Structure formats: structure tokens, C-alpha cells
Image (cartoon, rainbow, N blue to C red):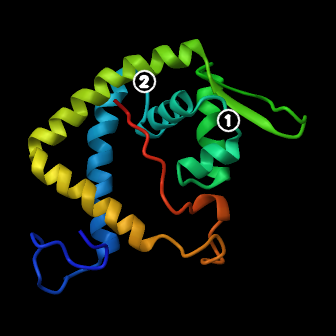
């Protein structure tokens, strides 16, 4: 599928309403679905995602983790605090004394494994509710849209932090 052409199965009428508002409503509803499931493991979706990224990417600098997650470094720092306090991740000195390294602890691995079961149930439930073909189409539309909306270069958006706008977001499986 071409990134600039409309997919053949989408309506060809003009959009109505505010796209931003509709996307925020969808994100809120889906977030509530996952947060409800992950609450049984004592996590929020943002915390589960952080644990998954740190587990898959290994010990890494906070700036690299923020870039991989398409997140502002200050937001990452704020979101890491409860995980560090719980003993699920460590924030240790890096190789040069000025840098830091984020790593998952054995307790964090266990918490992520516990939460993964709840995440899987939430994912299966969403797939069932929406239907797998619609979820596959939604994922494709999201990835196409992210590619189309990616800045041309790190300085393309003067207001964006260069590390927060990679050309392709990391695809970390939460499975």
C-alpha cells in the first residue's frame, strides 16, 4: 500500500469533526481497557510498557530509552520514578560517570511476567470485541499515519525534542 494513497477499504468521503479529538477519545477508551486489566498486577499501561522496553532493549541510557519509546526525556524520568521506588528497575551510573543506565531487576522481570498475563487477556478481549481484521487494519493505518507524520529530520519541528521524534518508533512486542 502506498503511504500517500488512501487504502481501498476506507470511506472516500470528507472527514467530519476533529481528528485529534476522536483519536484522544479512542486512546482514552483503549487505555482504560488495558489499565483495568493491568491493575490486577498493580501496574498502569505506561509502567508495563516501560518494563517491556527495558527488558527487550537491555540496560540502556535513559535518552536512548526515551528515543525508542518516542517519549520526552523528562516524561521518561517522571515515569521511571515509581518503577525505581518499587525496585523493578535500577537507574545506575553509566560508563563515564556523567551518564546513567536503566536496567530491569529480577523483581521487575517477575512483575512484568505477572502483568503480561493480564495484558494478554486485555489484548485478546480487544481483538475479540473489535475483530482481528479490524485490529490488523487499525495497526496498519496507525503505522502508515506515523510514517506520514514523521518529521523530515530531527530539526523539522523546532518545538520537538530531537530525541523524541525518531523516524520509526520502536516496535516492542508486549507479548
On the image, the x and y values in percent for residue 83 come to: 59, 28
Residue 124: numbered disc: none
Residue that extends furthest to the bottom in the rendered view of this protein: 14
In screen coordinates, is 29 left or right of 132?
right
Q: Nearer the viewer, residue 27 or 160?
A: 160
Q: Quadrant of residue 87?
A: top right
Residue that extends furthest to the right in the rendered view of this protein: 97
In screen coordinates, is 153 left or right of 101?
left
Residue that extends furthest to the front in the rendered view of this protein: 1
Mark 2 or 1: in front is 1
In screen coordinates, is 122 left or right of 78?
left
Query: How many numbered circles are shown?
Result: 2
Estimate how packed mark 1 is, as few (under 14), some (14 to 19) or many (20 or more) residues with alpha carbons within 10 Å.
some
Q: Residue at x 58, y 21 (%)?
A: 88
Q: Nearer the viewer, residue 111 or 57?
A: 57
Q: Residue at x 26, y 40 (%)?
A: 33
**What is the spatial separation of the Cα atoms under label 2 and label 1, in whole angstroms?**
25 Å
Q: Quadrant of residue 26?
A: bottom left
On the image, the x and y values in percent for residue 12 come to: 11, 82
Residue 60: numbered disc: 1
Taking 39 as reference, is 132 above or below it?
below
On the image, the x and y values in percent for residue 115 come to: 38, 23
Provide the residue designation for mark 2. Answer: 42
Q: Residue at x 55, y 76 (%)?
A: 152
Q: Quadrant of the N terminus?
A: bottom left
First-in-chain label (2 vs 1): 2
Q: Nearer the viewer, residue 162 or 80?
A: 162
Q: Residue at x 56, y 60 (%)?
A: 166
Taking 18 as reference, is 74 above or below it?
above
Amino acid at each position: 500500500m502506498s503511504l500517500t494513497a488512501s487504502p481501498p477499504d476506507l470511506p472516500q468521503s470528507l472527514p467530519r469533526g476533529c481528528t485529534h479529538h476522536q483519536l484522544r477519545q479512542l486512546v482514552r477508551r483503549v487505555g482504560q481497557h488495558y489499565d483495568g486489566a493491568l491493575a490486577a498486577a498493580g501496574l498502569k499501561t505506561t509502567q508495563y510498557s516501560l518494563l517491556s522496553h527495558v527488558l527487550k532493549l537491555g540496560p540502556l541510557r535513559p535518552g536512548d530509552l526515551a528515543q525508542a519509546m518516542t517519549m520526552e526525556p523528562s516524561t521518561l524520568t517522571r515515569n521511571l520514578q515509581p518503577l525505581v521506588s518499587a525496585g523493578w528497575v535500577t537507574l545506575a551510573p553509566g560508563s563515564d560517570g556523567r551518564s546513567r543506565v536503566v536496567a530491569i531487576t529480577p523483581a521487575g522481570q517477575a512483575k512484568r511476567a505477572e502483568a503480561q498475563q493480564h495484558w494478554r487477556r486485555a489484548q485478546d478481549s480487544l481483538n475479540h470485541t473489535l475483530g482481528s481484521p479490524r485490529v490488523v487494519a487499525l495497526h496498519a493505518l496507525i503505522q502508515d499515519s506515523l510514517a506520514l507524520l514523521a518529521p523530515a529530520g530531527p530539526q523539522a519541528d523546532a518545538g520537538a525534542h530531537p530525541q523524541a521524534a525518531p523516524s520509526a518508533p520502536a516496535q516492542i512486542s508486549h507479548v
